[in-house]
Image: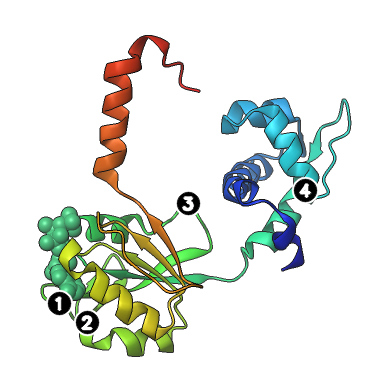
């Protein structure tokens, strides 16, 4: 989509948060919002929000703010909220099951459509999601046109599974394992290391407690 190509990545990352909040406003019957109010709700600063919105061609009017409906319809186009994005989950252990349970309910357009494991749970349906054997991975991914996968397997298995996913046509991997998997150009990996994140937080609290302001 053309609009998306021109939007900086940092702005694009904030977009789903704007979208979620604006949906909430629309549901509550609010028709306009100022950048200051949006800043308060999203915790991004108002200047960032105004700059982001200028990329969308939305210029708030002084004393009026932004039109919620107009912004939403633009964001919906960019985020393609109307089409459902099917995601695969590989590894139905503790973390995998938690994600199945969660299943991204806050977002209307993404869902885990299929999960895979080598042992337990195969053939079952958990949280409304069918669990397949790993031998069915390639076939299912192709059949369901899945191009995003979540990896919640032990790290020893991460690279092999990544290679299989890439061979099946997956273009994006959300990697919950501590292994930095290798992928060819054109495939994007988003690493989520929960232990690391928590450790970073502990480090900041222990070392910078007095100057941590939450910003
Ligand atoms: P976690 O909380 O990280 O999910 P866990 O203790 O529940 O940990 P792990 O040993 O990390 O379980 O394994 C996660 C899941 O991945 C398990 O359900 C396991 O059966 C599955 N698994 C292990 N190896 C493979 C593999 N090669 N392919 C697919 N699934 C695998």
Residue 115 is at least partly visible in this image: no
* Residue 2 as seen in the image, left or right of residue 93: right
Q: CA distance from mark 1 to mark 3?
A: 29 Å
Answer yes or no: disc 2 within 8 Å of ligand 1. Answer: yes
SS category of the residue bearing label 1: loop
Q: Are marks 2 and 1 in contact (CB under 8 Å)?
A: yes
Does residue 55 appear left or right of residue 18 in this picture?
Answer: right
**Circles 1 and 3 in contact, beta carbons < 8 Å:** no
Quadrant hosting residue 89: bottom left
Q: Secondary structure at mark 4?
A: helix
Q: Give the percent coordinates (x, y) of residue 155.
A: 19, 62
* Mark identifier at residue 118: 1
The percent coordinates of residue 203 (x first, y second) are 28, 25
Instruction: Bin the neighbour count of mark 1 within 10 Å (Cα to Cα): few under 14, some 14-19, many 20 and up.
Output: some
* 160 or 121, nearer to the observer: 160
Viewer-nearest of discs 4 and 3: 4
- At 26% from the left and 55% from the top, the residue drawn is 98
Ligand 1 under 8 Å from disc 1 Cβ: yes
């Amino acid at each position: 989509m053309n609009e998306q190509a021109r939007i900086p990545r940092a702005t694009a990352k904030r977009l789903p948060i704007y979208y979620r909040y604006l949906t909430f406003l629309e549901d509550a019957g609010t028709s306009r919002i100022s950048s200051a109010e949006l800043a308060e709700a999203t915790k991004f600063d108002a200047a960032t929000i105004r700059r982001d919105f200028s990329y969308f061609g939305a210029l708030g009017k002084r004393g009026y703010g932004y039109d919620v409906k107009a912004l939403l319809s633009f964001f919906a186009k960019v985020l393609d909220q109307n089409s459902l994005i099917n995601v695969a989950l590989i590894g139905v252990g503790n973390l995998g099951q938690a994600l199945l349970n969660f299943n991204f309910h806050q977002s209307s357009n993404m869902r885990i459509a299929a999960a895979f494991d080598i042992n337990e749970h195969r053939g079952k349906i958990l949280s409304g999601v069918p669990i397949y054997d790993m031998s069915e991975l390639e076939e299912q991914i192709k059949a369901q046109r899945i191009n995003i996968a979540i990896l919640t397997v032990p790290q020893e298995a991460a690279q092999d599974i990544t290679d299989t996913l890439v061979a099946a046509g997956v273009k994006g991997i959300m990697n919950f394992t501590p292994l930095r998997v290798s992928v060819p150009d054109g495939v994007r990996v988003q690493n989520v290391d929960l232990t690391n994140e928590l450790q970073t937080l502990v480090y900041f609290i222990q070392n910078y407690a007095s100057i941590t302001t939450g910003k």
